[in-house]
Structure formats: C-alpha cells, structure tokens
Amino acid sequence: MLVKTSLLLCLFLLGLSLGVEKEREEEGKNRKGKEQKASVPIPNKARAGSASATARASARSGAERSSHKGQAKKAGSHTGSAAQERSKGQAKRVGNSTVAKTVGSKTVAKSQKKTTGPRSDAGCTAVGGICQRNTYVCQGRYLKEKCAGSPGRQCCMPAGAWDVLCAGHHHNRVRACDRFGCGAFNSASSGAVHKGVDIVCDDYGNINAPFTGTLAGPVGRRGPDGIQFDGVKLSNPAHCVKIFNIRPQRYMGAVSQGDTLGYLLPLQERFSGITSHLELQMCDLSDPTPFI
C-alpha cells in the first residue's frame, strides 16, 4: 500500500514537471513569434503611403513657407507704400505749412500795411474835411490816408470847400463853351481832352489861393500854337493843383487860403472874343469840380 502511494506521488510530480516545461516552451514560442513580427520589413504599399504622406507634409510646409513669404512681401510692399504715402503726406504738410507760413506772412504784411496810417484825424480836419465811412454819401469827394482807423474810414472833402479864386467874383464859375472851346473837365479842347477846369476871371484881376498850402515852384504848359501858359504849383497834404495863365507874385513859400497869388494874364490880346479865364488842374489829373 505504501509502495502504491509512493508511485502515485512520483507520477504526479513527473506530470507536474512536464506541464511546467510545456508552459515554458509555449511562452518561448510566443516570445519568438512576437520578435519575428517586429523584425518583419514594411511592405512597399506602406512605404509608398508613408512617402506620399511625407511628400504631402513637405509640400504643405513649402506652401506655408511660400505663403508666409508672399504675406511678408505684401506686408513689406504695404509698409513701403504706406511709408511713401506718409513721407509724401509729411512733405505735403510741410509744403502746405510753408505756403501757409508764406501766405500768413503776406497776410500779416498786408494787414500791417493796411493798418499803417494816420494816428489821428488831424490831417483831414486841417484841410476842412470830415472823417467818415466811405460808404456814406459825401457831397464832394473822399481823400485817402487822412483819417485814423480802418482803410474804409476816409476824409470827406465837401464841395465848395475851396475859396473863390478870382477876386471880385462871388463864386467860381466854370467857363462855358465859346468858339475856342469849352472849360468843363474832360471837354474837347483843340483836338485833345481837357484835363482841367477853366475858371472865369477878369484880365489882370487878382488870383487868390483856393486853400492853405505851400507854393512849390513855377509850372508851364505850351499850347498847340506854341503859346506858353505860365503858372504856379500849390499843394498841401490833401491837395495839389497847378494854376495856369497867371503871373505869380512869388513861386515859393507858404500861403493861406484867400491870399493873393498874382494876377490873370490877358487872353483877349491873343484870342479875341475868348472868355477870359485861368486854368485849374489837379496834379493827378483828377476832376477839381467838386471843390470849386
């Protein structure tokens, strides 16, 4: 009985050892199979797929790089154009500022020139005028640069502000037309335009100063027939006149309104039938009619 038990035990142990060895052999086989599978080369299709994937990836990266370059190029061109536009705008602004400065300096110069004038109305009142806006009616004519203030404020010289030129007459009468011509301003005289006014006087009659001023020397005018018409120049800050066909007592010095300047030269000896007169002419050839 004991022998049988020992035999059975030996057989059991033997089977157990055999089973363990079989398990070890199977594990070794499985391990070898896995190693062989891992070492098996990749098929051509797999290689082609991986190559195409690599090519697609490289193409994509190239496209991205080119797009990045294009964007950078565009950004550079935009930046350059923007810089050019900014530089042009700055240059334009600089030019405009220069023009503005130039225009501003011209405006300042003009305004200074306009505002530079008399500081008082004494120059106007001294000659018998009234300072007022030149938009108002003036019964005479306006004189510039005689009044303080804006350029639109001028000196109004009333009509008839001058004294009677010919002694013995109550007013300055303009010579009417006769066969030798007319005495009004801008009338036709010997084929020319008469830029003066003829005042009727008596031969050898005294001639008075029409306004207070200074005698500025002799004046003369030769007519178409060669006859010399002598005279004198009288001026003040407001007026300047030439008086022809008189014989002055003197040619220089200050005179007051109404003072005797000389006498009228006779015209009947030269022009029989003509109305005796003196000729009054403004130095600027304007019309003296409003003042006489």
Image: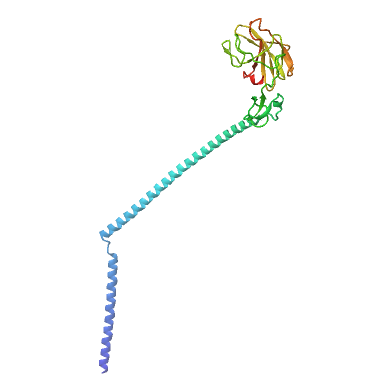
The quarter holding residue 201 reads top right
Q: Is residue 171 above or below residue 10?
A: above
Residue at x-position 27% and y-position 86%: 12
Q: Where in the figure is residue 284, as x and y percent of width and height? A: 63, 19
The answer to whether 10 appears left or right of 153 in the picture is left
- Residue 78 shows up from this direction: yes
The answer to whether 268 appears left or right of 60 in the picture is right
Task: State the quadrant of the C terminus.
Answer: top right
Camera-side residue of 288 and 203: 203
Residue at x-position 66% and y-position 30%: 132
The answer to whether 36 appears left or right of 229 in the picture is left
Q: Where in the figure is residue 83, as x and y percent of width and height? A: 48, 42
Residue at x-position 57% and y-position 33%: 103
Image color mode: rainbow
Residue at x-position 29% and y-position 75%: 27
Q: Residue furthest front?
A: 170
Q: Is residue 287 above or below residue 270?
A: below
